[in-house]
Image: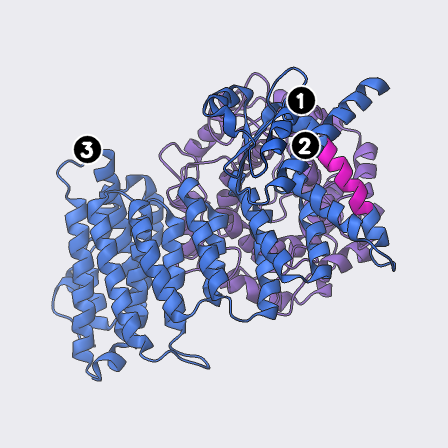
Amino acid sequence: MTTQSSYSDQKGLNLLQELEYILDSDPLIDEVGFIHPSQFVALDHNGDDDLLQSEGGIESSRRLQANFSETGKLRFWCRDHKLGISTEVLFPLYNAAKHLFMDVIRQYKILRNVYGEKDNMESDVMKHSRALLLLSCDFGTAWNSRKMVLSKEQDLSRFMDELHFSALVLSYSPKSEQAWSQRRWVIRMLAERCPNLQDIVEKESDLVRKITERYKMNYRAWNHRGWLVSYMTISQVLNELNKSRHWASLHVADNSCFHYRRRLLLKIFSSKEGPSPVPNCTAILYQVWKEELDWDEMLIRRYMGREALWLHRRFLSLFWIKHIAIELHGVLSHLEDNTAQNNDLAYFLDNEFQLLENCSNIPDSDFEDGKAQAELSASHFSWLCKQCAKSLPTEIQEKLKTRDLKTLLHKMCPDKSFLWDDLGFDEPSANCIGPVDEN
Amino acid sequence: MEDLVRELAVDKHARYIVSVEKRKDDFESVVMEHLRMSGAYWGLTTLDILGKLDMVDPDEVISWVMSCQHESGGFAGNIGHDPHILYTLSAVQVLALFNKLDVLDIDKVSNYVAGLQNEDGSFSGDMWGEIDTRFSYIALNCLSLLHRLDKINVEKAVKYIVSCKNVDGGFGCTPGAESHAGQIFCCIAALAITGSLHHVDKDLLGWWLCERQVKSGGLNGRPEKLPDVCYSWWVLSSLIMIDRVHWIDKKKLIKFILDCQDKENGGISDRPDDAVDVFHTYFGVAGLSLLEFPGLKPIDPAYALPVDVVNRIFFGR
């Protein structure tokens, strides 16, 4: 038993050495993946000559050898800075990486506050945690050990390397919470020394775009991009709105992207006040919001039955009514004229109702998309009425009461009848339809 | 209902959980070892709800849990790993299941948790400073179970959670972050534990939550996502806490969860016909318990522990 386990330990250590050698030889590796042996065959035929070749020609043949097992099976594959690890070696490799890492971190924690040279130990911590995290992305203790070493060194280029490394982990595990968290830790460290983070913010934003391209609806990735908004200038915010518009229109079901846009819009809203208000911010806000509403309506009409688009509309319209049409109207038009404001509001709500009418009367509503569109439109309009009712002038409130929302909702979305009954959507009563009683 | 009872493979699920705990011979099982403490909480709570907690040896579990405690007072996900608030709550919950909170140095554990509160009321997950409303919930749940809420500034903790509320009525992981059913559960449960649910617009949030039910009867955690059994816990418990659970179709949800069982080998998956795991087995069974499925122990929607365990802690019976 002992012989057998020490044999497999040795096998694991050899594998780990090979992996660490490959990683050291090509610091530019930017993608890693686990590959089933049968997939290696396909890669293999794609160009044996390039296998593991980086800079040195003589070296490459030796490394090529090193990556086959005794039975001739390929264990690692590396080309064009892409690394593949055979699924057959993951178990022994992981065990070896974990044991070496746990040993070195235990010693390091004991000795790190004791005077003396610990460079070797620190480089072992970094080396073994790197291998371990490429196999188990959320091994928190390994990420922590790296933070421990990095915060002691306080070396700018090492912080940048850490951004590269966590991106490598994200290439095989785009939802890794720990990898995203590590990036935020690094960026907070960098922010302490250089207040200008424009470049980093831009690169981060780009990384998220690339990752979400391959893995849709990734909450952690989008949340990371949203976290960056607080570091952005207004021109960056506007630029981000522009850059993400095309992406969003190609991914109309990705609520996270639309939420990111909401976050950007709110950043503009909050920039009109505070210690250093952005000049002309109110006009920018008005313009951008209007464009977003029109763009969203265009997408709604083009892509039927998409929940994320309608939820985006809830936010846009409610905010428009409460904070732009009512609060900012006076500022924008330089008029204190209530009639103009009410007309604006009435016009806006009429447009929303028109959208509902168009979307709920789709001839082919036997199709799922048509049904969903009708359901979402009814739900949107009712939600909006419910949420903004108290902010509206009385006469507009009264006008809204003439719409028979209850019947509409029960017809369009019968499976949510409990909700509609409870929320108290009244059927229109006779006195609501008549002229508005000023009392 | 009689027919339904037979639909839940109680014995097989219990055997599945016990077997997973012993598996250590492949990559898929070892790669999860850093969060074994949470795995223990999911597995053991499931066993307790199923009335099968006697299938494990309490002494073995407790001595392992205690060997994961760090000198700081916090618990790690496994022996030799770093402590984190996530695993500290799991450890306290596991000890609570076995009525063994008395093995803890209560002040040491609660000082660790209280020490993670920040100036703005939020909580970090560990000494490295990542902030999340999940950690707020964990801190409040943990300190409440240990009767040590007085060690933190509860008012500020509540204020921070409320600052994470969105226009749709939901909550995200930090202020401004997208609403997510998992984060909503954390925030609502934290507000429930501190008696602060008046900060919630129940109709607005309830509307968003009941829109998580899709045609198959299952619940998703965000708009346009596929349904997943784990949201049977997060969405459902939130709806119960804000008293709006009658807005969803419970019968269809029960059927969805039952369809996610592996009736041959035990365990529950995220969706019908997927591979099972302990995490989804827990959330499936806990969801059924919230739906008052016959034969299961009722579970508390805020503390995420069986109601009898919570009563024992707060009413000493």
| Residue at mark 3: chain | A
Taken as a whole, is the magenta stretch helix, strand or loop?
Answer: helix
The one nearer the camera, B59 or A203, is A203
Q: Are marks 2 and 1 on the same chain?
A: no
x and y percentages locating residue A88 in the rendered image: 62, 23
Question: Which of the image's four quarters has the C terminus of chain B?
Answer: top right
Colour in which the image shows chain A: blue
The residue wearing badge 2 is A18
The residue wearing badge 1 is B15
| Residue at mark 1: chain | B
Residue A102 in the magenta stretch? The answer is: yes
**What kind of residue is marked 3?**
Asp
The residue wearing badge 3 is A366
Q: Is residue A129 above or below residue B133?
A: above
Left/right of residue B219 with respect to residue A391 in the rendered view: right
**Label 2's element?**
helix
Residue sitting at 24 percent across and 73 percent down?
A393
**Label 1's element?**
helix
**Mark 2 and mark 3: span between their CA atoms?**
60 Å
- The residue positioned farthest toward the front in the image shown: A58
Residue sitting at 40 percent across and 40 percent down?
B213
**Label 3's element?**
loop
Magenta residues span A96-106
**Mark 2 and mark 1: span between their CA atoms?**
40 Å
**What kind of residue is marked 1?**
Arg
Q: Are marks 2 and 3 in contact (CB under 8 Å)?
A: no
Colour in which the image shows chain B: purple
Q: Is residue A332 above or below residue B212?
A: below
